[in-house]
Amino acid sequence: MIAPQAFARSLAEVQVGLVTADLESRLVAVELSSGRILRHVRTPSYPRSIESVGRVAVVTHPDIGAVSLVHGLNLSVTHVLHGFDEPRYTAGHPDGRHAYVTDAGRGEVVALDVVRGRVLHREPVGARARHITIGPNGRTLWIALGSRARQLAIVDVSNRARPRLVRRFRPEFLAHDVGVAPDGRHVWVSSGDRDELLVYDALTGRVLARPSGDWPPQHVTFGGHRAYVTSGWSGTLRVHRVDGRPLVRTVVPVGSYNVQHADGWVLTPSLGHGNLCILDDGGRVLRSEKIARSSHDACVVTAA
């Protein structure tokens, strides 16, 4: 039986898209069910990427070498961490407490405790560390070393506070984004120089599929047994099965590069136009809202 207080809280909580307004030093909180703008959250300058880690949204500010932490429930900045050179992207551990941020300027991955707002460890992984993903068991990171990366880094995080570089390897093309599917077996690598992706077997390293991805670079996210791939230059979102089989191709605003899936929602903001495109699990556009002059990334949080 649900306690009355908990039930009341659940009724008051709403699913919110937190979207970076890159040129306006703020995040835009959008109610996903209606597309209504709930509020603006002031941040340090030039927020670029954002990732939900438990109840916290981790926001990187590569232009000023900072990372800000935003509490999802009350939509307020709780910590601003400095000492980075060019922080780029974040992967959140399934425990909801630990996060791993790539620092392209230092060639490092940085472990954070997002609850206490602390940097725990810095591990050298290779120059231009950029897009990052974590396996569903929370033991391995995959990192693309550049926007057109000749190498990927594999990092062990079985000790959550101390990432450890295991090895690097060369994909068959210049890589851009990387993502581990929820099944833990399929690893998707998008391209920085061609209109296809590679799907690797996480255990053997064997290429399992080569899905089409429209103009590079592409970005990838997952929901259940589906992969969602955007091409910002083409203005498309493709839905595949995680094994690479194609399902749907949808038109989205040009400039919709980054893409995130959570709780049945697919979000892709437009860098060039500042639109947030909200889609359902099947890749159907529900709404597209103008929310900023330019928007690089978005994530889903639960707010009160």
Image (cartoon, rainbow, N blue to C red):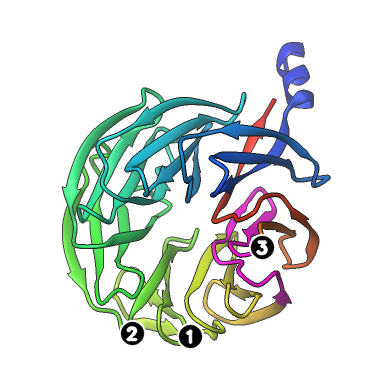
Image quarter where the C terminus lies is top right
Of marks 3 and 1, the one in the foreground = 3
Q: Amino acid at mark 3?
A: His
Query: What span is colored magenta in the figure?
Result: 250-272
197 left or right, relative to 108: right
Name the residue tied to disc 3: 273
Please provide percent x and percent y for residue 254.
65, 72
Mark 3 vs 1, N-terminal side: 1
Taking depth in this image into account, of 157 and 110 the one nearest to the observer is 110
Q: Is residue 263 magenta?
A: yes
Q: To which quarter of the image does residue 233 belong?
A: bottom right
Image point (23%, 40%), residue name: 159
Q: Residue at x 51, y 34 (%)?
A: 43
Cβ atoms at labels 1 and 2 below 8 Å apart: yes
**Residue pointed to by mark 1:** 196
Task: Answer left or right for 141 relative to 53.
Answer: left
